[in-house]
Image: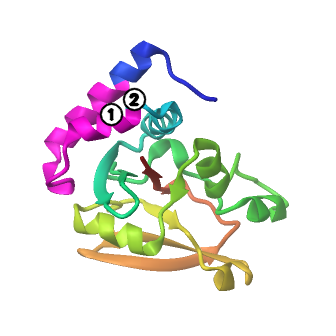
Amino acid sequence: MSTLSPQQQQDLLTTLQARFETNMHRNEEIDWALIVKKLEANQEKLWSLHRMEESGGEPDVIAYDQQADEYLFCDCSKESPKGRRSVCYDREALNARKKHKPETSALDMAADMRIEILTEEQYRHLQRLGEFDLKTSSWVKTPTAIRERGGAIFCDRRYDTVFMYHNGADSYYAARGFRGLLRV
C-alpha cells in the first residue's frame, strides 16, 4: 500500500481545498467536507492525488457521480502536466521504437499513478470548465480500432475550439503529455 506521511497528507489536503475553493465554478454544489471524509478513509486515493500534484497536474474536483457516489478529480493545470510530457502513448508503442525512446508512456505512467487517462468526452467536459492546453496537447484514451492500426489520439485547444487529432502512438513531443482522472 502506498501511503503519505501525516504532514504530506495535511499539506496535500490544504492545497486541494484551496484549489477547490478558488475554482468553485468547476464544482458547484459539492461539499468539501464530504470529499475530505472519503479521502481520509482511502490512503491509496490520497497517494494518487499526491502523484498527480507532484507531476504538475493541479488536480481538482470537476464532478460528482451520484450513481457511483464518487467525486471526480481531474488534472486542471493550464497546460498538460509538465512532469508527464515527452511520452509516447503506450508500452507497445514504446517497445516498437528503435531509436530515441522516451522514458515511459502515458498509459504506463497513468497505471503507475493509479489514475485513468481522460477519454475524449472527459477532455471536452474539462474544456467546458476552463481553457486548457492552449500551448500543449494531451493524449486521450484511444479507441481500439485506431490503436490496432498504430495510431493514437490527442486533444488541445486552439482558436477557442477543442480539437482532436491523431498521431503515431510511438510519437512523443516536449509539449504533449496526458491528463488523468481519479474517482474518489
Residue occupying image coordinates x 44% and y 71%: 155
Give percent across and percent down for residue 84. Answer: 54, 47
Q: Nearer the viewer, residue 100 or 29?
A: 29
Main SS of residues in magenta:
helix
Res. 135 in view: yes
- The answer to the question of whether label 1 and label 2 lie on touching residues, with beta carbons closer than 8 A, is yes
The answer to whether 154 appears left or right of 128 in the picture is: right
Quadrant of the rendered image containing residue 150: bottom right
Q: Is residue 151 left or right of residue 120?
A: right
Q: What residue type is labelled 1?
A: Lys
**How far across and down, in percent of the image, does residue 46 sit?**
45, 33
At x 22% / y 39%, what residue is drawn?
32
The dot on residue 149 is none
Secondary structure under tag 1 reads helix
Nearest the viewer among 172 and 123 is: 123
- Does the segment drawn in magenta span residue 65? no
Residue type for callout 2: Glu
- Colour setup of the view: rainbow
Quadrant of the image containing the N terminus: top right
* Disc 1 residue crowd, few under 14, some 14–19, many 20+, Cα 10 Å: few
Closer to us: 30 or 24: 30
Using residue 81 as the reference point, say whether residue 16 is left or right of it: left
Residue 162 lies in what quarter of the image?
A: bottom left
Image: 99 above or below 142: above
Residue at the disc numbered 2: 40
Q: Give the range drawn in magenta.
A: 12-39
- Residue plotted at (37% across, 38% down): 38
Q: Which residue carries the number 1 mark?
A: 37
